[in-house]
């Protein structure tokens, strides 16, 4: 199954950034299930291989925010 995506969001509460549950899911997948297989030349896109053989791409679509903004993880194969 290709095309699944997890899009993280940030909320700003009392001047602090609060990551939503999707950000935490992405973080958990990277730490526990995915293996890094490549990085784009600019460093903003990272490809991972899942333990089930799927390929995922991590990006930061809100690049105007500090640190590139919240993460987006999309299955590309």
Image: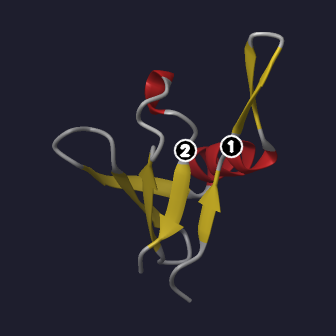
Question: Of residues 44 and 16, which is closer to you in this image?
Answer: 16
Estimate the x, y position of residue 56 in percent, counting from the top left: 45, 65
Question: Of residues 21 and 12, which is closer to you in this image?
Answer: 12
Question: Of residues 62 and 46, which is closer to you in this image?
Answer: 62
- The reply to whether callout 1 and callout 2 are in contact (CB within 8 Å) is no
Horizontal arrangement in the rendering, residue 26 relative to residue 39 (left or right): right
Horizontal arrangement in the rendering, residue 40 relative to residue 23 (left or right): left
Residue located at (52% from left, 33% from top)? 69
Q: Earlier in the sequence, mark 1 or mark 2?
A: 1
Query: On the image, numbered disc 2 is attached to which residue?
Result: 71
Residue located at (73% from left, 43% from top)? 24
| Label 2 element class | loop
| Label 1 element class | loop
Residue located at (68% from left, 43% from top)? 9
Name the image quarter holding the C terminus. Answer: bottom left
Query: On the image, numbered disc 1 is attached to which residue?
Result: 9
Estimate the x, y position of residue 2 in percent, counting from the top left: 51, 84
How far apart marks 1 and 2 lie (CA) works out to: 8 Å
Judged from this view, the residue extending furthest toward the bottom is: 1
């Amino acid at each position: 199954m290709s095309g699944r995506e997890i899009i993280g969001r940030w909320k700003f509460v009392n001047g602090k950034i609060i990551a939503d549950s999707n950000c935490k899911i992405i973080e958990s997948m990277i730490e526990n299930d995915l293996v890094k297989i490549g990085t784009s030349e600019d460093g903003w896109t990272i490809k991972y291989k899942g333990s089930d053989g799927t390929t995922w791409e991590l990006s930061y679509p809100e690049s105007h925010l500090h640190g590139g903004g919240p993460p987006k993880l999309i299955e590309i194969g």
